[in-house]
Image: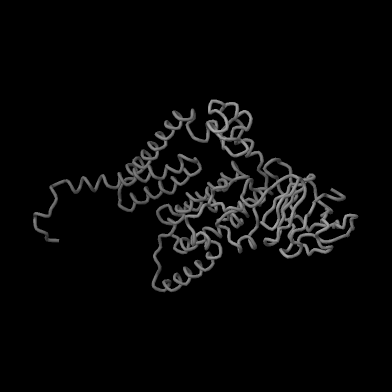
Amino acid sequence: PDLPEVYEPPAGSWEAAARWRPLLRWFAAGLLLAIPGAFRPFYLVLLVPALLAARAEARTLGEGAGRRLAAFGLGAVLLLAGTSLLQYAAGGDWTSYGGERQGFYERTGFPAVDFPASEWDASVERWGNTSWLFPGAVADYAGSWDWDLGRWNALYFLAGRNVGVLPYFLPLVLAFAAFSPRHGRWVLPLAVLVAAVAFFVVRPFNFYGGTGAIANRYFLPLYPALWFVAARPPRASEVRGRAVLAVVVALAATPFLLPTWRAPRAFPVTEDGRYHHVSALARDWLPYETTQSHLPGGQDFAARGLWVKLLTPGVERLGADRLRLTGEGPAEILFASPEPLTSFAATLGADAPARIPLQGAELRNTVLRPNGGVTLILAPDAPRAVHPMWWTADDWYLYELEIPADAAQGATLTLATSGGG
């Protein structure tokens, strides 16, 4: 308290710095929080709890909140205005999701490689515009909403095999264990919920962000925001309980996060076309997200009026409607029908045994074929899900069939509907 005069700052400079420091801090906060919103407007909802925090800080210090709120808003507006002008100059629209947009694959060819870049317009006309905001896009997706679809999306968002928030972001439990509603923090979970619902409405068949996603790419910017709900230090009586909770959460998260912990730099999709971060336990215990289009994990194709998805390497496609059991683990087959199935036929080639243990269907009849093969007439179990698919607003009935790895290795299998649907 009695420092020599040489250490004292020049008169007035300390007071000036003290006045400007919070304004600069809130300006930087607005600038940084607007960055994810410049990519996808839904993240701008995170500005709301920050605004409440600025007001609460000013109230705590007995000051007016106007200057802090103005600095925060100025930072956000400058960032959004700057990025919008750059996007407009580069792509002809205020956002990267508003101009003409395409993804290029082997089937489409690549500009300046397989076709001249000048043929962009022809490519858009042939393959379609994948912009989020082209005329009618939002209305088309929002019109696909129904309660069955929303219910399944909510389940998959929370506990899906590939993109579930609970298994792959489980450490958030520790943040909520130290939850404090002060300084606007009570709004953070609500803001995240609003953003998630917005993705459900606008992208009901792709709320996870595409095949390059790590667990759920659209949720990633919301994940660090939720950590700010933690603001209550443990009381002396809670220290041991918090330590035990940390250990329990780590153990519970290990089966789902171990592949990522062991190889954090691995490419998200493995050589067999499946997600690197999905462990064997997740494949066995968590539901596959049937509402989501283009999830990695095997081929999907149409065969005899059915939509078929091969979920494991234990089965591969041979022809239009023929499959081969490879023996590389169980063969898990997902198929969907526009009508409820009373039965379906699985025809096995002559190289297959006459009896195969199946999960997901009950054997009704066996028909021996002249070539030594056998046709199994099967009654499927109740549909595992009923909801619209990404190509139609009508409900489809989804069934799952699993064949053990050692049941018929190398056998060929042909699927067909049979009787009643």
Please state which of residues 398 and 14 is positioned toward the viewer in this rendering: 398
Name the residue at 43% across, 74% down: 240
Please state which of residues 242 and 345 is positioned toward the viewer in this rendering: 345
Where on the picture, by quarter, is residue 332?
bottom right
The quarter of the rendered structure image containing the N terminus is: bottom left
> What x and y, as percent, mark residue 166?
56, 59
Name the residue at 79% across, 44% down: 305
Instruction: Report whether 22 appears left or right of 389.
Output: left
Name the residue at 66% across, 48% down: 291
> What x and y, as percent, mark residue 318?
74, 49
> What x and y, as percent, mark residue 214?
53, 52
Instruction: Report whether 151 appears left or right of 343.
Output: left
Please state which of residues 390 and 17 is positioned toward the viewer in this rendering: 390
> What x and y, as percent, mark residue 401?
75, 57
Visual colour scheme: one colour
Is 213 located above or below residue 257 in the figure? above
Is 74 located above or below residue 222 in the figure? above
Name the residue at 44% across, 63% down: 178
Where on the picture, by quarter, is residue 352?
bottom right
Instruction: Report whether 186 appears left or right of 415.
Output: left
Q: Which residue is most to the left?
A: 5
